[in-house]
Amino acid sequence: MHFTTESSADGVTQRHFTLDGAPGVLWQPDGSPLGGRPLVLLGHGGGQHKLGPGLVDRARRFVRRHGFAAVALDAPGHGERTRSAQDERFATEIGELIAAGRPVSAWVARHTAALAERAVPEWVAVLDALSGEAERTGRTEGPGQAERPGRVEDPGHAEGLGPIGYWGLSLGSAIGIPLAAAEPRVAVAVFGLTGHASQAEAAGRVGVPVEFLLQWDDALVPREGALALFGALGSREKTLHANPGGHLEVPEPELESSERFLARHLIRAGASAAPA
Amino acid sequence: MHFTTESSADGVTQRHFTLDGAPGVLWQPDGSPLGGRPLVLLGHGGGQHKLGPGLVDRARRFVRRHGFAAVALDAPGHGERTRSAQDERFATEIGELIAAGRPVSAWVARHTAALAERAVPEWVAVLDALSGEAERTGRTEGPGQAERPGRVEDPGHAEGLGPIGYWGLSLGSAIGIPLAAAEPRVAVAVFGLTGHASQAEAAGRVGVPVEFLLQWDDALVPREGALALFGALGSREKTLHANPGGHLEVPEPELESSERFLARHLIRAGASAAPA
């Protein structure tokens, strides 16, 4: 993991990095190490990137409101990354399908599944690298732990990452669902705006609490497919929130609710995992 | 409206009444009149009654947390009310259907529609009576209004009820949906655990914000029917929250979320309706 630029604003440090060719951004509270701190993985939507609209605000809210760290990666073929011939072909063809008024969901599912195959190992590598970073830099008092009686602060104590959550809709879910299925370090997730039969098998292997957002009038994701994907999630604790409107019209209060859902579970996981 | 017994506990006054033969209960903050105060109508589920489990706690939370008033009625054939031959026949027949493992949703829809035809005019009469009660007893500083600058408290000022919300699941929705369709004083509603094609017409005439709760594994309400009913609601602002589990297994955090939804809209409606 190679850190390049670093900046700070309003108490939030933003550090750019690359890992095996994947460019990413890490946000954390100014002057505080990663160790023991909850970490939110932020997956962006299709055509977006690691610094896209909404994503940076969300990352900064997690840091400022809860003291979490957050990290985003450019998905393959997105943001600063070069687009393969396949990526270029997809961008052309989906535009043609939409212009012709033809259904795109199967097309999107096939392409995003191919992206997920490349993206999941990248996220796993980022978790490995950030775990090493956390152990190297030690910890300070983390959120939700200040009230533990008798705790002695030990900034030099080597410790891995705190509990990890994933937040990502649309392409962010197409990548996040197989990631959560494969990666036991992900403890809670927000998914949504996706749903194709090809995702059901991975969804069945997800066992962590999930909040799933569905847009009732989503022209890109058939309602039945999204409902079936929610049903396929293996999680005992899962909740579906559906609202009127199109793919890009998730109501702001619903997005805020999803952030509270993730934060609540991460704080709970951190409290139960904290050493006595 | 004939008030009978009155009691008080923890700052909440509970008054029993009857109106045209329908027994009801009114909750409000001790020593405070109704005028200008948000009012929550609480519809109970099938086989339950106005003082059933959950309902009283919910009423008391609205009073204690938000300073609202709340009111519940025994639905026709429920609680203290005598059961008609039709009510008795239904109770027998639905038991036989369930015992035989046969689908009950059409049966339930037909019976609850008949109950709603009797219950909706009773709720309208209660609103009329409570409006008169509010005008008769005047008002004090209501919730969400203390911060209005320059407001002079005028306890003797005649004023009707504040904004009105409806909270009711299952039978409570079978009654609440046609009530909200017919009664323009209802400004926001929580519905759920119901869904039959026969309810779609009334749902289409509901225009207020609605939170709709659905249980994914509800043996009494087919999932497709509940989803279609949510889709049929005419409200521009509506949100569906679905969770795993059966008809009686709505997660407690979801119930609390629905109370916050109702309270948020009632406080907003009260603020915008308040005289300058």
Image: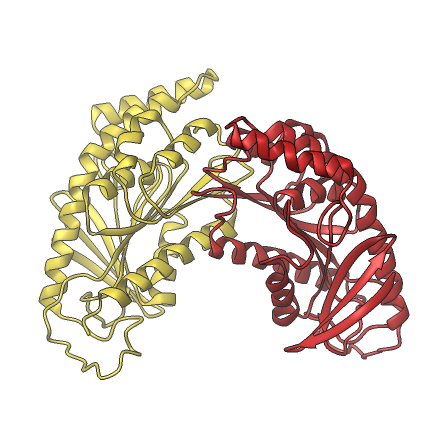
Chain colours: A yellow, B red
Give the percent coordinates (x, y) of residue A179.
23, 41
Q: Residue at x 63, y 78 (%)?
A: B10
Count how many numbered circles sit on residues in the image. 0
Query: Is A27 displayed left or right of B29 in the figure?
Result: left
Q: Is residue A217 visible?
A: no
Query: Is A236 displayed left or right of B93 in the figure?
Result: left
Q: Is residue B196 visible?
A: yes
Q: Is residue A168 above or below residue A47?
A: below
Q: Quadrant of the C terminus of chain A?
A: bottom left
Give the percent coordinates (x, y) of residue A88.
27, 25
Q: Is residue B207 above or below residue B261?
A: above
Say which of A234 and A155 sits in front: A234
Say which of A87 and B275 sits in front: B275
Give the percent coordinates (x, y) of residue B252.
48, 56
Residue B98 placement: quadrant: top right
Query: Is A7 displayed left or right of B24 in the figure?
Result: left
Give the percent coordinates (x, y) of residue A54.
41, 50
Say which of B204 and B171 sits in front: B171
Query: Is A198 displayed left or right of B72 in the figure?
Result: left
Residue B34 placement: quadrant: bottom right
